Amino acid sequence: MSDAPLLEARGLTKEFLVKPQGSTFARRRPFRAVEDVSVQLREGRVTAVVGESGSGKSVLARMLARTVSPSAGELLVGGKVIDPHQRRDLTYTATVQLVLQDPFASINPVHPIRHVLERPLIIHGTASREVPALSKELLERVALTPGESFLDRYPHELSGGQLQRVSIARALSVRPKVLLADEPISMLDVSVRLGVLNLLRDLCDREHLAILYITHDIASARYIADEVLVMYAGQVVEVAEGTDVVDHPRHPYTQLLVSSVPDPGHQDRVRIQAPSATAFPEEGCRFAPRCPLADDRCRRQVPELVEIGTGHRVRCWRVEEASVLFSSRNSQKGGGEIT
Amino acid sequence: MSESILRVENFSVDYGVGDRAVRAVHDVTFSLGRSEVLGIAGESGSGKSTLVYGLTRLLRAPGVIRSGSASLTIGEEGQRREIDLLSADERELRALRWRHISVVLQSALSALNPVRRIGKEFDEVLRYHGQGTSRAERRARAEELLAMVGLKSDRLDRFPHELSGGQRQRVMIALALALSPDLVIMDEPTTALDVVTQREIIDELRELRERLGFAMIFITHDLSLLVELAEQIMVMYAGRVVERADSSDLYAIPRHPYTVGLMNSFPPLSGEIVPMSGIPGSPPSLASLPTGCAFHPRCPLASEECSLSSPPLVVEGSRSLACFHSSPSVRERLEIRS
Amino acid sequence: MRVLLRRFGVYLLTAWVAITANFFLPRLMPGNPIASLIGKLTGQVTPQEVRSIQLQFGVGLHSSIWQQYWDYWVNLFHGQLGTSITLSASVSSVLASQIYWTLGLIGVATVLSFVFGTALGALLGWTRGARTDSLIPLATFFQATPYFFLGSVMVLVLSNNLHWFPDLGAYDPNATPGFNWGFIASLIRYGELPVLSILLSSMAGWMLGMRNMMVTVIGEDFVLMAVAKGLPRRRVIWHAARNAVLPSVANFALAIGLLVSGALLVELVFNYPGVGNLLLNATLNEDYPLLQGIFLIITLTVLGANLIADVLYFWLDPRTRTPVTQ
């Protein structure tokens, strides 16, 4: 495996000018949808970004796909910095591909599947006589067999799960190195989700892709990811390898998130209480208004992302107290245990 | 054993008529206790929403109730009355609506009239049901209701699009409880919300239920949520009930392969990472159901008889099951992690 | 509010452009308009008329174009739109005299058509699939029939043969014009048939539009909610109609804007005075000052109606009030 990540983001920030709600004559103020996010996508690894709506995860994906240009920070492909003035061209899209949430919205309903796969193949230079065989092969790579039977069907004739696989096949047609999947399974039926998720993991392992998996479902992130990032209000608040983020969450927000997921096996654990989300504060830690541990420093200064264990980084001034105060998911029978 | 508030027997709903009719709900039988929570779990095409819209006579064309009976028991202790939901006329239905049965729809944004302020919704519901003789009185009651779900009274002057998703859903719940109904039906109320807001709302619901004692039907695809929230769970597939049991029983010993597969579709939050597969294939379209048991093409236990006839729903005490192959060891046979 | 102010600014700008175009257009015409006009009027022109034409076309004047432009605006603000060649009176007085007829007849008819059309459309949308649906093809038939034919047939059958309605004209020739009941009563009587004919031929549009919107809106969840809440049926219909009428309101404002161009066919069939006739004669006689005046009024009224439509929408649909944010 080469050293440089296939795709890397350093300090990406995206600001939008927004008028505060309810006022008509106030000046537009900058709203940071994404702030200082760094992430490395490496070959053969699935990196998950977990966040709620408003966390900035989709804007991050758009910046990585270069459909949105960052306000600050840089992007590197294979170790080389991308010139922000250079437009997103075929070389880039042949390297980095995006798969979106709703396959019925991202695939043109008036064309058959054959056309859906043909277009990117031809645009990226495949000879037209090779296209039919390649299309069939792509479909089989995403476990839609036999491939021929799907080529002449229309999108509305396929189920959500099948169509999402077509969407992935379309992304694979240009032989990308990186696949950015923005909530790829949220709109699918529950029983179908794991199939598509397993497919993504499989593609990553077999074909040595780098995969970015964006989701609001932390359990699915734990299931397939090699590294998990948790985002809140545009910032990365916690990063860890494997299952550490879910098994040993250190940031108060992550703990709130993990304890909110329905888990019938552990109904007696301690629940974290935090008031409902309000507008993000102008200064200091974004989570401070909701955090039971917030003190003056939290409210004045934005914490740095600090390494607290191998590959485990947290953005919190009071991370030690956070670990002691809340129970962890792996506690045996009842909450209150310290991990 | 609490007395029942809702009794449904052999209830069926079709879409369309004649040869082209598609059966969306097939022969559903269940009962609900006075303060009980029934969870209905299923995916698209399961008929779970059609079932409750049919029972409350809110079906849209071309939905048609084909057969069965449904009765609602209302009234004070000692003065109970049974109302036949399916044959009630418009006047009787109006008397029942909101006062005895209320609904919370999935998308609060489209359920609330976008051109009216929230306060007006409360005012209208209270006014048309004869509660509160002056606007001030009704406003006070609306503020009470909002406080019950943790919202500030200034929300009454806002429009729906000015509220967040979680706030809107809370408004819907407050509205649904405005007349202290006996039964509240919730159709995927938290599906569009993030998990933290969902948790807050579920906790609030639990508290409200303890305080007010209403019965609830909660529809969702998230089986783990139901195990936490409901006392009874009914699993539906392709319009039929495939399994019904007390939630703790269902969680401990699921007996239908679909139930097992469904549970196997939610990666756990702890323990070793073990490969999970969900269920191969996808839920069938109601217009072209497989022969025999609708689940058999996806079922690891399917045998020939499964493709020939649809297994009947067998009721044993508080459990119902529709499968030829069920046994307590189904779970082990499917090698599902517990 | 800011959204509205910005819109208003755009309208002001548009109005300015329209008025300026109105100023320049005659000057861009080729040839010598003065000579041809004088020729047409066989030399019988008064000096005022010549002056008026000169002002209009900017020919034979010795002031700079900017001076003329400035004068044009000054005149505009004084209500001075020039002198009509054919009628030898000031354009503004000519317009003023005719516009009341148009506003009265066509205005009333348009409003009635809108009100009845949308009300019927709402009911038809609610009872979709019932036999009453056949009202729509019927109304569309009347709308598709060429108006002069429809109007003429109505006059022939209802007025001439059955004598249910009076003869052509705007009022009883025996009545004395003025603010007396006899005159007003005859105005109303003579106006009934024209209004009826307009209703018949234009209601279909409103009905169809409203009905289709109703059908869409009824499918929305908040209507289901209204039913689920146990509200009486007329209240549910009211809710649906209130939302469904929004696009029709915008169209209505535009229809009002176009009122001032008159309804030529109505005026012809019923021998009714109005701006339509005025416009026709001005065109036939190449009475440029009058034409310009009419066009200016039409432009400004349409712009005004657009602005009113915007304001109405703003008021009726609160979603348009919030600017697009995250």
Image: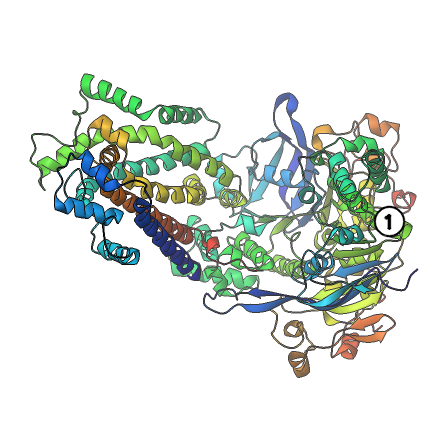
Closer-to-camera residue (C139/A70): A70
Closer-to-camera residue (A302/A90): A90
Q: Where is residue C86 in the image (x, y as percent from the top left)?
A: 17, 37
Is residue C299 something that shows in the picture?
Answer: yes
| C252 with respect to A69 (left or right) | left
Q: Position of residue C171 (x, y in %)?
A: 14, 32
* Screen quadrant of the C terminus of chain C: bottom right
In what element is the residue under mark 1?
helix
The residue type indicated by label 1 comes to Leu
* Screen quadrant of the N terminus of chain C: bottom left
Which residue appears farthest toward the bottom when viewing the image?
A296
Q: Where is residue A225 in the image (x, y as percent from the top left)?
A: 83, 58
Quarter location, residue B300: top right
Picture residue at 77% right of the left edge, 58% below the top: A263
Quarter location, residue A237: bottom right
Q: Position of residue B119 (x, y in %)?
A: 46, 57
Label 1 resides on the chain identified as A
| C81 with respect to A324 (left or right) | left
Q: Vertical placement of A238 versus C91: above or below?
A: below
Picture residue at 38% right of the left edge, 37% below the top: C118
| Residue indicated by mark 1 | A203
